[in-house]
Image (cartoon, grey):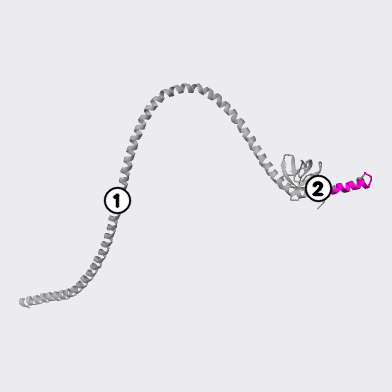
Amino acid sequence: MSTLTKICVVVLVLLTLFASVVFIRKAGVDTNWRAYAEKQRHRANIQESYARAQMVVARHWQQLYEEAVRDAKKERDRFDTTLANRDSELARLARSEAELQGQLTESQDLNKALESTLKAQVEYNKGLVEQLDKQRKDNIQLADQLRRSRDKIKEYLIDIDNLKKQAEFLQEQLTAKEGEITDLQNKLQRLESEVARLRAGAGGAVPAAAVEAATPVGEKISAVVLAVQGDLASLNVGSASGVKKGMVFTLYRDDKFVAHLRVAEVGPATCAGVLYDRTDAVRQGDKATNRLDLE
């Protein structure tokens, strides 16, 4: 092969390669332009959305800024008012301080005048200290006596209160017994009339059996404890109910034996006696009877 032919072949190969590159590049460039256009449109849409969002955020921050400005103005007005009040208060305090300073000066002058008087008073007080010591000892003794007296008064007041309650209870019992007393008085009158009639019929002498039959001996008497003091107790029945000195009552509570009471003093509507054979503490309100075998 000649040199010219080789050169032509080489040139043809180079032209073919160059043409291939050009064609390939042209095809690729056309496709990239279309994709680029799509990307640009998408980017424009994104930027537009971003711009709208930025506008919304800007309006929001603008509103917040305006509100902050308004709040700051209100706060500044409030601070101005507070400062004005503080200025007024400081002025008032300054006037008060001046007045107090004047009073302090007067007090200092007065203290100087009193100082000499106090010196004399101190000397006089020294003389009183011994008297006060003696008086203090006397006061301690009097305080002890007063404390004991107060304790006694408290005990007396408690006793008085108990006596008042007993008196009120007795008054109620007395009112309740008035009708019974009237009936007993009528019964007693009838018994006296019967005794007089028997004496007249027997020539002035009444048999012992008739007298015993006319007297209600051994009848059941029920009572309630009014008050208790040590070994003594009082009941709400008396001579009007047939109670006599020496009569024995049985005290019980809820069907439980508590103690015996022997009558020592008898009144019209109450009686009092000595407690013995106690199995429990006798209380106000416990029941009592002279007969347990009668219902």
Which image quadrant for residue 25?
Answer: bottom left
58 in relation to 237, above or below: below
Q: Which of 164 and 61 is in front in this view?
A: 164
20 in relation to 135, above or below: below
> Which residue is at a point 78% across and 49% down the rendered structure image?
182
What is the CA distance from the residue labelled 2 to the residue labelled 1?
100 Å
Query: What secondary structure is found at the residue carrying circle 1?
Result: helix
Q: Are marks 2 and 1 in contact (CB under 8 Å)?
A: no
Q: What stretch is highlighted in magenta?
A: 183-204
Query: What secondary structure is found at the residue carrying circle 2?
Result: helix
In the image, taking residue 79 as reference, residue 170 lies left or right, namely right
Q: Which of 38 and 87 is in front in this view?
A: 87
| Coordinates of residue 278 in the picture (x, y in percent) | 76, 43
> Which residue is at a point 46% across and 23% down the rendered structure image?
121
- Type of residue at label 2? Gln
Mark identifier at residue 77: 1
Mark identifier at residue 224: none
Q: Name the residue under label 2.
A: 185
| Coordinates of residue 229 in the picture (x, y in percent) | 72, 40
> Which residue is at a point 20% across and 70% down the rendered structure image?
40
In the image, taking residue 137 as reference, residue 22 lies left or right, namely left
| Coordinates of residue 186 in the picture (x, y in percent) | 81, 49
Q: Which of 210 and 72 is in front in this view?
A: 210
Q: Is 212 one of the magenta-colored residues?
A: no
Q: Nearer the viewer, mark 2 or mark 1?
A: 2
